[in-house]
């Protein structure tokens, strides 16, 4: 699984440091049997992006590794600061913050669109999503910008 993932990534990124940490959960702590892989890359600016895939009965372990590698490569290609799974998680914090928040992402996920919709319905925050203009036009990069509501915790 991990060797297939590394081979897939090295087709695009040849000069690559790889640190494989295989984990087997103790039988008394695991529920059922299964496999999976999480691949994390740190960019030159310190951003952490990831790709993952789960194995299942009858699914080749190389396929699992390649799926995770392709997900990671997709997240690296777009040049954003967050991966597909983090972008929607940031919306609530942007909505609650004071002032303007911006985040550079890849293609906007349906989860992110939904989070923006409900954040605007539930708060006074206003979001705009624009195609990033400072990037290579072939990259699918966007800027999510929010004028936050300035929530203050009165208990602090």
Image: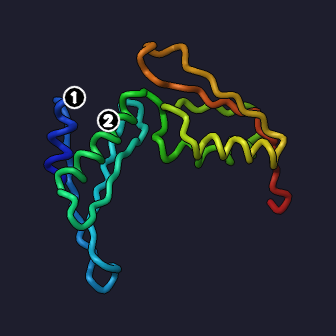
Which residue is located at x 32 percent, y 35 percent?
73
Above or below — where is 47 with respect to 104? below
Which residue is located at x 55 percent, y 19 percent?
132
| Labels 2 and 1 touching (C-beta < 8 A) | yes
Q: CA distance from mark 2 to mark 1?
A: 8 Å
Which residue is located at x 31 percent, y 59 percent?
54
In the orientation shown, which residue stands out farthest toward the front?
A: 58
Question: Is 132 on the left or on the right of 21, as rendered?
Answer: right
Front residue of this view, candidates 125 and 19: 125
Query: Which quarter of the rendering shows the C terminus?
Result: bottom right
Question: Residue 97's spot in the image, x, y percent?
Answer: 73, 42
Badge 1 marks a residue whose secondary structure is: loop
Residue corresponding to mark 2: 73
Question: Residue 11's spot in the image, x, y percent?
Answer: 17, 31
Question: Is 1 on the left or on the right of 37, as rendered?
Answer: left
Question: Residue 154's spot in the image, x, y percent?
Answer: 85, 58
Which residue is located at x 27 percent, y 64 percent?
56
Kindly identify which numbered label has been placed on residue 12. 1
Kindly identify which numbered label has been placed on residue 131. none
């Amino acid at each position: 699984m991990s060797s297939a993932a590394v081979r897939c990534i090295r087709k695009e990124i040849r000069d690559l440091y790889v640190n494989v940490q295989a984990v087997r959960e103790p039988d008394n702590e695991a529920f059922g049997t299964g496999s999976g892989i999480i691949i994390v890359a740190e960019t030159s600016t310190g951003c952490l992006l990831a790709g993952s895939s789960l194995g299942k009965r009858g699914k080749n372990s190389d396929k699992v590794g390649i799926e995770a590698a392709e997900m990671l490569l997709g997240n690296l290609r777009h040049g954003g600061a967050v991966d597909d799974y983090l972008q929607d998680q940031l919306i609530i914090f942007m909505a609650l913050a004071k002032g303007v928040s911006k985040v550079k992402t890849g293609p906007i996920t349906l989860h992110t669109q939904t989070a923006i919709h409900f954040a605007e319905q539930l708060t006074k925050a206003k979001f705009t999503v624009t195609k990033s203009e400072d990037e290579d036009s072939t990259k699918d990069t966007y800027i999510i910008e929010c004028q936050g509501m300035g929530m203050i915790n009165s208990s602090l």
